[in-house]
Image (cartoon, rainbow, N blue to C red):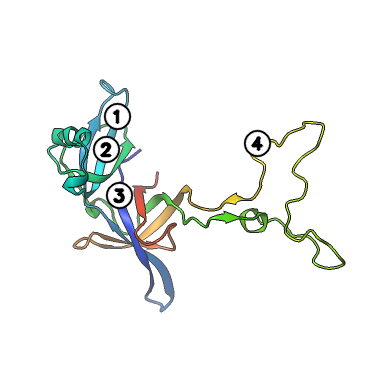
């Protein structure tokens, strides 16, 4: 378990390798983040590091948050994220975490919320097959039977039905870093990343 860094998705583009092949990439602005709290086994029962990202407007800061950030002598942050660690050595309150801790060629795990697509039917949400479209059939995209009648006499939990599609937190594992721009705090990640531009990302080195 290692500490990660928070960032925001900027968008997608493409770059060309030395052979002239186009590689789709996602540009991410990662950090800088500040350590706002250090949890230890003695007090909280486990070791963890809490980091903050993007300064919060003073008028939106609650009184309960003021005391929390005063302990680390840092400005209030909009986003807070906690990472469990095995040890807390070489970590201090107020320490800044940047993309300098990552290297080109590293693999990272990206945790973020996917794009919400609203209420969707069975064909789109679960890849169900449709009914016949001819010969007087009136069952084209209907769900059909959802369970037996007398036994068990109810719909079992987890039944695949129509409902909300997307808008879930998921983790994309082993995404390769193919570029780092330390001056702008930018990461160039190979392939696509879930979510819309501006989406909050949690980036952690793959184990």
Q: Residues within 10 Å of mark 2 (few under 14, many from 20)?
A: some
Q: Is residue 154 left or right of residue 93?
A: right
Check the image and name the residue furthest to the left.
73
Q: Quadrant of residue 153?
A: top right
Disc 4 to disc 1, how far (Cα)?
A: 36 Å
SS of the residue under disc 2: strand
Tell whether label 2 touches label 4 (CB within 8 Å). Answer: no
Identify the mark at residue 157; answer none if there is no mark: 4
On the rendered image, what quadrant is the C terminus found in?
A: top left
Q: Residues within 10 Å of mark 4 (few under 14, many from 20)?
A: few
Q: Which residue is mark 2?
A: 50
Q: Which residue is mark 3?
A: 6
Which is nearer the eye, 158 or 106? 158
Residue 137, image x and y in percent? 84, 62
Disc 1 to disc 3, how far (Cα)?
A: 19 Å
Q: Is residue 15 above or below residue 152?
A: below
Identify the mark at residue 47; answer none if there is no mark: 1
Q: Residues within 10 Å of mark 1 (few under 14, many from 20)?
A: some
Reading the chain from its start, which is encountered first: label 4 or label 1? 1
Q: Residues within 10 Å of mark 3 (few under 14, many from 20)?
A: many
Tell whether label 1 touches label 4 (CB within 8 Å). Answer: no
């Amino acid at each position: 378990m290692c500490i990660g860094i928070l960032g925001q998705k900027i968008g997608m583009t493409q770059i060309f390798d030395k052979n002239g092949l186009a590689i789709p990439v996602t540009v991410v602005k990662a950090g800088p983040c500040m350590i706002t709290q250090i949890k230890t086994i003695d007090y909280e029962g486990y070791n963890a590091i809490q980091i903050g990202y993007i300064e919060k407007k003073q008028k939106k800061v609650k009184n309960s948050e003021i005391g929390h950030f005063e302990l680390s002598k840092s400005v209030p942050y909009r986003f807070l994220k906690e990472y469990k660690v095995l040890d807390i050595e070489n970590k201090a309150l107020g320490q800044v975490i940047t993309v300098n801790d990552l290297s080109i060629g590293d693999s990272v795990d990206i945790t973020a919320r996917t794009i919400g697509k609203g209420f969707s039917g069975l064909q789109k949400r679960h890849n169900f097959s449709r009914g016949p479209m001819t010969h007087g059939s009136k069952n084209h995209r209907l769900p059909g039977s959802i369970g037996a009648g007398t036994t068990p006499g109810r719909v079992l939990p987890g039944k695949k039905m129509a409902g909300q599609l997307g808008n879930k937190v998921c983790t994309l594992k082993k995404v390769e870093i193919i570029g780092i721009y330390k001056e702008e705090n930018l990461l160039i990640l190979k392939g696509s990343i879930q979510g819309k531009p501006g989406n909050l990302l949690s980036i952690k080195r793959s184990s």
